[in-house]
Image (cartoon, rainbow, N blue to C red):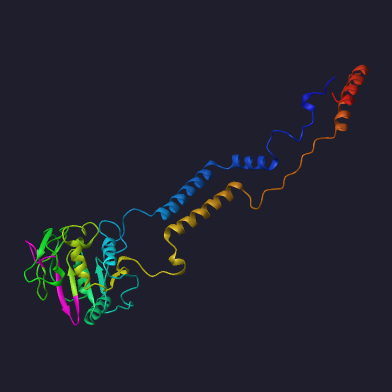
């Protein structure tokens, strides 16, 4: 008589997974689905953050910032200057503490805010021989930091302006300047107006102060990425910078950029990545419901053959059939 199949010992070549893997799969099945979903979402956001840093984002940035590649940025002007012999610098330090060289041209366009102390520092820079390009859309909020009384500014303006009779250095080789029509000066009392338009004085006022010069722009759009290549805007932008070789300093602290060091220098996207990794780790720990390495595997040895033989013998003895017992023992001896 052959041994029952259910009672046969399990061989070491069983098709079932090893014990550590079965335990891991069991823990995975017990993990709530919401935890797995949170881990998946965290991983997706982390992958997008890393990919965004690697490939860079789309055009954007603050208005009239030399870092900005959007339509209203000045990145193209900064690139044009660097390619035509003007060293370009970005000033991230506050104007209150920055060291300004009178040999440079300083650009402050569309600032978020300018304090009176910063305005006095800019005027001292111009008086020592510096060249200042100041203004932009809605200059009425920042001009009082320079002058107690400032020229009147109008919201709308013609989109085309031509050099005024007599000419000036800023009109050299420029036949027309095109703007977005976002502002113009209404009068030029105490200033020179090198351009003229049909409805007002124009977009630029100039004034000498000490050994330096101030260029007041009512509308920075001719210098921005969107219009720099239109009409004579590129040449106008170069003329504003001054003589070839003059360093142009874009003040970026007025656009929210500052000097950073240590932990403050880490980009926000990297902080987001660290937070996501921490969250994913905590969720994994919660899902596993324990800390530490996996438990060591316990080897499961098959029962000795003698135990199987004794159990079968006792089972057959209950039948009282000596012939069947003898036949079964013969089969076990022969290995059948």
Q: In this view, does 221 lie above or below 27?
A: below
Q: Does the magenta stretch include residue 197?
A: yes
Q: Nearer the viewer, residue 177 or 83?
A: 83
Residue 35 visible in rendering: yes
The x and y percentages for residue 170 are 16, 70
Q: Which quadrant of the view contains residue 192? A: bottom left
Q: Residue at x 59, y 50 (%)?
A: 285
Report x, y in % for residue 133. 22, 71
Q: Can residue 138 be seen here?
A: no
Relative to residue 203, is residue 289 depicted above or below?
above
Q: Which of 288 and 227 is in front in this view?
A: 227
Dividing the picture into quarters, in which one does residue 257 lie?
bottom left
How many labels, in total? 0
Which corner quadrant holds the C terminus? top right
The percent coordinates of residue 53 (x first, y second) are 42, 55
Q: Quadrant of residue 243?
A: bottom left
Q: Position of residue 81 (x, y in %)?
A: 26, 66
Residue name at image x 12 percent, y 69 percent: 152
Q: Is residue 141 above or below residue 59?
A: below
Q: Is residue 219 left or right of residue 21?
A: left
Instruction: Give the magenta part as a residue range.
Output: 195-213
Magenta-drawn stretch contains 117: no
Position of 257 with respect to 128 (left or right) is right
The quarter in which the N terminus is drawn is top right
Q: Which of 165 and 136 is in front in this view?
A: 165
């Amino acid at each position: 008589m052959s041994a029952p199949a259910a009672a046969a010992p399990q061989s070491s070549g069983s098709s079932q997974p090893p014990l550590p893997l079965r335990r891991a799969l069991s823990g995975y099945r017990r993990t709530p689905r919401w935890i797995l979903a949170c881990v998946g979402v965290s991983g997706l956001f982390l992958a997008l953050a890393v990919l965004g840093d690697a490939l860079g984002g789309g055009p954007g940035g603050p208005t009239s910032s030399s870092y900005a590649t959007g339509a209203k940025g000045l990145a193209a002007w900064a690139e044009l200057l660097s390619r035509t012999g003007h060293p370009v610098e970005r000033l991230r330090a506050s104007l209150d503490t920055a060291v300004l060289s009178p040999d440079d041209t300083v650009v402050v366009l569309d600032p978020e805010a300018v304090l009176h102390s910063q305005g006095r520092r800019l005027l001292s820079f111009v008086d020592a021989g510096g060249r200042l390009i100041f203004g932009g859309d809605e200059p009425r909020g920042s001009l009082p930091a320079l002058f107690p009384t400032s020229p009147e500014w109008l919201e709308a303006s013609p989109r085309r302006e031509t050099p005024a009779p007599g000419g000036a250095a800023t009109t050299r080789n420029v036949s027309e300047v095109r703007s977005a029509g976002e502002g113009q000066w209404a009068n030029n009392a105490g200033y020179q107006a090198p351009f003229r338009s049909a409805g007002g004085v124009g977009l630029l006022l100039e004034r000498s102060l000490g050994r330096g010069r101030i260029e007041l722009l009512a509308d920075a759009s001719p210098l921005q990425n969107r219009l720099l290549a239109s009409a004579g805007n590129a040449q106008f932008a170069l003329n504003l910078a001054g003589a070839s070789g003059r360093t142009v300093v874009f003040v970026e602290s007025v656009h929210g950029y500052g000097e950073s060091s240590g932990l403050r220098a880490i980009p926000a996207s990297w902080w987001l990545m660290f937070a996501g990794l921490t969250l994913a780790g905590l969720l994994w720990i919660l899902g596993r419901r324990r800390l530490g390495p996996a438990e060591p595997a316990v080897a499961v040895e098959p029962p000795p053959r003698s135990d199987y033989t004794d159990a079968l013998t006792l089972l057959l003895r209950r039948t009282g059939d000596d012939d069947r017992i003898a036949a079964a023992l013969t089969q076990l001896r022969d290995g059948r």
